[in-house]
Amino acid sequence: MRLLKLLYIVYAVLVLIVFTLISIPLIMLTFWLPKAKRGNAIYFLLRHAVDLLMFMLGIWHTTIYESPHDNKKPSVFVFNHISYLDAFIIMKAIRRQNIRGLGKYEISKIPFFGFIYSSAVIMVNRSDKEDRARCVADLKEAIDNNISIVLAPEGTFNETSQPLLSFYDGAFRIAIETKTPIKPLLFLDAYDRLHYSSFFTLSPGKSRIVYLEEIAVEGYDLNDIALLKEKVYQAMEAGLRKYQATWIQ
């Protein structure tokens, strides 16, 4: 089994290298586009690349809809953050190219990759109060332009045996201020496919996403952030327990 695991990891590394080499020239073709359209084009390319990549890695995907989802209107997507694979799963979860996630400012400094990264996400320097305010303004502008935003309200990996870490306010503040509904997503199997501790834990198998019922924000104001946050938290926690997420003890 150890030999098979090693062979799989070597194979996965080679697949990732090949996909990177193929993706670079395709992404370079988007550089002449305005930033907003460039981001949409990059998501379009990445979405189809991830489809093929996960197939090549032996990871099969299922989306479970507990309630209907209108993919044409913007939403504030929130998800449980449990693995580096989450970035790939987002491409499987949200089948529209006009989405934006939140990205770490430090990654934008990496040559070439940083340019691509900053085109596809909204950057934030968490140590800078003014930059955090600018980031919130950019997220609101994205929604005004019919672009959905994707946020991990836990802020970092959940490395506990509990369903979720506590939530930050940001996603819920933005949802209330823009009157945009919240769409909770559950990533059930990313923890088993790629543990946050090491790339060498990557394994083939199932990947399930659950769309929980949309949570409307009409009737909420900024004094109700804690109430809305708790409502979303309880819905996601109940969902993770219902589907028996494997990290919960």
Image (cartoon, rainbow, N blue to C red):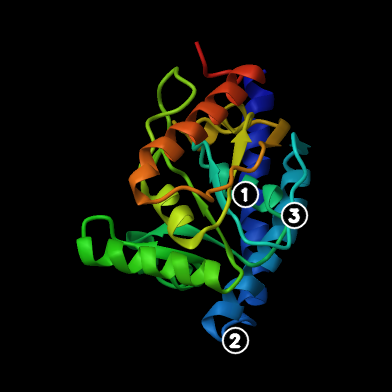
Residue under pointer 1: 90
* Residue 139 x/y as whole percent: 45, 65
> At label 3, which amino acid type do we have?
Asp
For residue 191, say whether it is visible.
yes
**Camera-side residue: 175 or 88?**
175
Q: Earlier in the sequence, mark 2 or mark 1?
A: 2
Tell me: 67 left or right of 24. Answer: right
Q: Secondary structure at mark 3?
A: loop
Q: CA distance from mark 3 to mark 1?
A: 17 Å
> At label 2, which amino acid type do we have?
Leu
Q: Residue at x 64, y 29 (%)?
A: 189
Q: CA distance from mark 3 to mark 2?
A: 28 Å
* Residue 194 x/y as whole percent: 57, 33
> At label 1, which amino acid type do we have?
Ile
Residue under pointer 3: 70
Tell me: 152 left or right of 45. Answer: left
Q: Which mark is residue 164?
A: none
